Every structure is written in structure tokens, then in C-alpha cells.
Image (tube, helix red, strand yellow):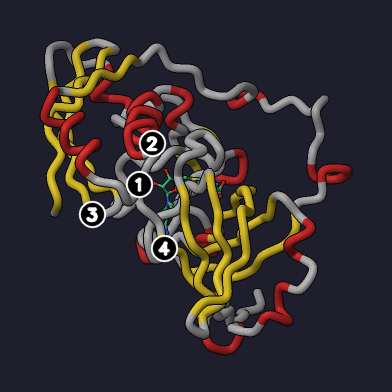
Amino acid sequence: MSDYTISAIGHIESPYKQKFAIPRQPRLVPQAKAKLIFAPDFNREEFVRGLDEFTHIWLLFRFHETADKGYSAMVRPPRLGGNERKGVFATRATFRPNAIGMSAVKLEGIEYKNGQLSLLLAGIDLLDGTPIIDIKPYLPYSDSMPDASAGFADTRPETEMTVEFSPQAIEFINAQTQYPDLQDFIANVLKQDPRPAYKKQKEGEQSYGMTLYNFNIRWQVNDSHNVVTNIEKN
Ligand code: SAH
């Protein structure tokens, strides 16, 4: 086996501050906006010249938060309710040899501000601080295969989840102006039903928390109904 050294070309600034509640693939929550901040060695406009002609890009990145936990030959994909096992190479699991992830995301702009080059992205599924190891333009004529089949993950995960906001939550959202999409963003994250599979089988009301941007968000789930009970600054 050969060993290689890979260095990050940049990192992600993302609203997702913890793994819990990040959608399981990119583009499921289009309101998830992020910035890719280039590292000093790549902080030059030449590196991205021509990239603005593309609407979507591939990001290759390191699952840095879980990389030191190693990998297993078989994993339990959430799509199968967490009960059935598949070979790690038959899944998009994070616990994999080399801990490399890939996501096709929307490129909304290229910014060069105060001497810092960054890409403006949407629909991301990446944790804040994720190291990026490569970027490539998305090529529809080759990367999109509409007649492909995908076994246990053949269709976009559909959920029946509904989302309601408490008066306090609505008031908080309306009082801030920085994130105009905040309510839609929270609702779409919750519609993905971020709870682990074993929790979904439990009956009765349960309470959860997550941090998006610098907001602590609490919600309750009863069957397939979410109520955002409280939002506060953290
Ligand atoms: N689109 C990628 C990721 C799929 S796994 C791929 O197919 O390779 C998606 C999960 O990765 C998310 O639910 C999130 O919990 C996790 N994740 C995102 N960024 C991560 C990071 N930097 N380290 C560890 N896990 C991360």
C-alpha cells in the first residue's frame, strides 16, 4: 500500500455547528449556505478563473470530525432504518478508509473581499470547519445519469414530517435580519427528520436541540409532527 500526504486547499464556513441535524446528502436543504475559504497557498484569483461559468461544483473533503474513529467493512445505512448492514463501499457512510467525502453543491458566487478568496455555496451537507481537499466543476453531460439505478437509495428520502413554530420562535426569527431564509432553513432541516433511526421508533413526545449559525434551536417531536419550541442566541 502507498501512503500519500494531502493538504487542505481551504475550509468550509457552514451554519451546521454539529453533526446532528446535517442532511444526509447535499441539495436536500437548498437554504444551507456556506463559504469555502481558500488557504493562503491558494488564495489567488487564478486558481478559480473560469469557475464562474459553472453553476455546480464537486467538493472533495475530509470527514475530519470522525476521521480518527477509523472505519468498518460494514455499516448500517440510515436509509435502511439502521437495522441492515451493507459494505462500506456500497454506502456514503462517513466511517470509511481515508475518510474522504464528496458533495455536488450549487456555486452561487466567487468573492474576493479584504484579500480573501472564497466561494459562495448552497445546498451543502458539511460541518463547519470541514477541510476541503479538491474542487472540480460539475459536468452534467458526464456526471448526470438520469437512467441510473441506486438500490436502497434510489429516490430522494421522503418524509411526512410537518413543522410548526411557537410564537417565541417566530418572534425570534422576525427580530433578526441577517438570515432572511432562517425559518425555511430550520423547517427543511427538520423535515429531513435528523433523529437517529432507533429514536424514530420510540413513542411519545421527545425534545431535541441543534445549533444553526449562532442560534440554539429546540424542538419537540410527536409522531411526525415537529414543534420548534424555542430559539436563542448561543
Ligand atoms: N455527500 C457526502 C456526505 C455523505 S454523509 C458524501 O457522500 O461523501 C453526510 C453526513 O456527513 C452528514 O449527515 C454529516 O453528519 C456528516 N459530515 C459532514 N461534514 C462532516 C465532517 N467534516 N466530519 C464528519 N462528518 C461530517
**Marks 4 and 3: CB-CB under 8 Å?**
no
**Residue 192 lies in what quarter of the image?**
top left
Q: Which residue is mark 4?
A: 13
Name the image quarter holding the N terminus.
bottom right
User: Which SS class for mark 1?
Assistant: loop
Query: What's the residue at 16%, 32% (across, down)?
Result: 171
Can residue 82 be seen in the rendering of this structure? no
Tell me how far mark 4 sits from mark 3, CA to CA. Answer: 12 Å
Front label number (2 vs 1):
1
Question: Disc 3 residue type?
Answer: Asn
Indicate whether 43 appears above or below 151. below
Number of numbered discs overlaid on the protein picture: 4
Question: Disc 1 residue type?
Answer: Tyr
Q: Residues within 10 Å of mark 1 (few under 14, many from 20)?
A: few
Tell me how far mark 2 sits from mark 1, CA to CA. Answer: 9 Å
Q: Which residue is mark 3?
A: 214
Q: Which residue is mark 2?
A: 185
Determine which of the numbered discs, if any, sits on residue 179 in the image: 1
Mark 2 / mark 1, whichever is N-terminal: 1
User: Which SS class for mark 4?
Assistant: strand
Q: Position of residue 197 (x, y in %)?
A: 32, 26
Task: Describe residue 114's horizontal placement relative to residue 112 as left or right.
Answer: left
Tell me how far mark 2 sits from mark 3, CA to CA. Answer: 14 Å
**Residue 110 lies in what quarter of the image?**
bottom right
Question: Disc 2 residue type?
Answer: Phe
**Marks 2 and 1: CB-CB under 8 Å?**
yes
Task: Describe residue 191's horizontal placement relative to residue 198 as left or right.
Answer: right
